[in-house]
Amino acid sequence: MRQLAAQLGGRDSRSNDLLRHVDPDGAEYFTVKATGQSGMSHSGLARFLGVPRQRVSKWVKRVQEANRAENSLPNCLKPFAGWDLVLTGYFDIEGRNILTDGFCAAMIEYYASYSKQVNKESQVKAQQTLDLIKHLGMRFFIHKKTGWKSSDRSSCPVETNFELEFEAHRVRLSVREILRLEEYPELKSAITEYGQKHHCLCPKLFSDTHDAMNKLLQGLKAREIREQNKLSRNVSLRDHYDTRPLMDYSAISRLTANQIRYQEKHPVEAVRIAFELLLPKHTPQSVPIIENVYRADKRLRNVGNQRRLKVGVQLSLFTDDLAINPQLL
């Protein structure tokens, strides 16, 4: 035990298998270096929620022992009934199992929205974090804490490479769809409302807003980014960004829309304020251009179909109507 504690010691630390971060209040986060799977310790989650560790342990036991079909769990915890809620084979410095990120998010939602057995300060913290988690996802919230990046992956067996690639792609595609279907229309409508109210609605207002975003994040306008990467004018740059840049654009888009709509800020000024709130110490740098996300989706699904036919089984990764194990989310 002491050897493990020494191995993981410090507020931010690394071991052969795990990255660890501890907040000043004692909330403790872990990420598996090889896969990016993340979670929190029992005591760390308890400190975060402002409740005794025993209360978290009781919830873990109750959820694990609950009947999957019929149970009296709160709605946010029902999807985890009967499942193993830990990162198998990984432990905190006290030798306890590490709770999966998905279950931790559900516990935060419970204490933010349902429970009355928590002080107001902790509940406000849970509510604020819940808003961020709903936007970024719990796993990426913890990645921000532990500093995990895809380059931290250790060498993996060949047979797991495809699963890891597809898992990373699935997250990237989800973020891109959120940005395309939710954040962009939200920002567009906010700019439209501002332009109509102040009699300055024109295409340049939209382009200036997005150029301000690109300049702050990358130091270049969209036209310059396309020219630098030899992309045509019709190409959507965000289709070629990886997950983290998409998350940054998504968060800034939402914050910008809020500044325009609720603070009556000019769209370009709103971008600047949003940027200072989200990335105050960011230095502009080019975002790598990678394979188009929709082309990658088609390629990976074709590979998955070939693998399925080869081994003669139905891979759960590609079964749309299969019940999803929340431990994998």
Image: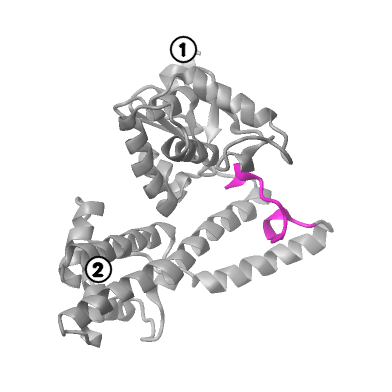
Indicate yes or no whether the magenta region holds residue 238.
Answer: no
Task: Look at label 1 and name its amino acid.
Answer: Arg
Task: Look at label 2 and name its amino acid.
Answer: Met
Distance from disc 1 to disc 2, alpha carbons, whole Å, reads 48 Å
Q: Position of residue 177 (x, y in %)?
A: 48, 67
Of 26 and 65, nearer the camera is 65
Proximity of marks 1 and 2: CB atoms separated by less than 8 Å:
no
Label 2: element kind: helix
How busy is the neighbourhood of tag 1: few (under 14 within 10 Å), some, or many (20 plus)?
few
Q: Is residue 77 left or right of residue 304?
A: left
Q: What stretch is highlighted in magenta?
A: 314-329
**Number of numbered discs overlaid on the protein picture:** 2
- Residue at x-position 57% and y-position 47%: 329
The vertical placement of 43 against 269, above or below, is above
Q: Residue beneath label 1, please? A: 2
Chosen colour scheme: one colour
> Mark 1 or mark 2: which comes first in sequence?
1
- Residue at x-position 39% and y-position 62%: 246
Q: Where is residue 14 in the image (x, y as percent from the top left)?
A: 41, 31
Residue at the extreme top of the image, as rendered = 2
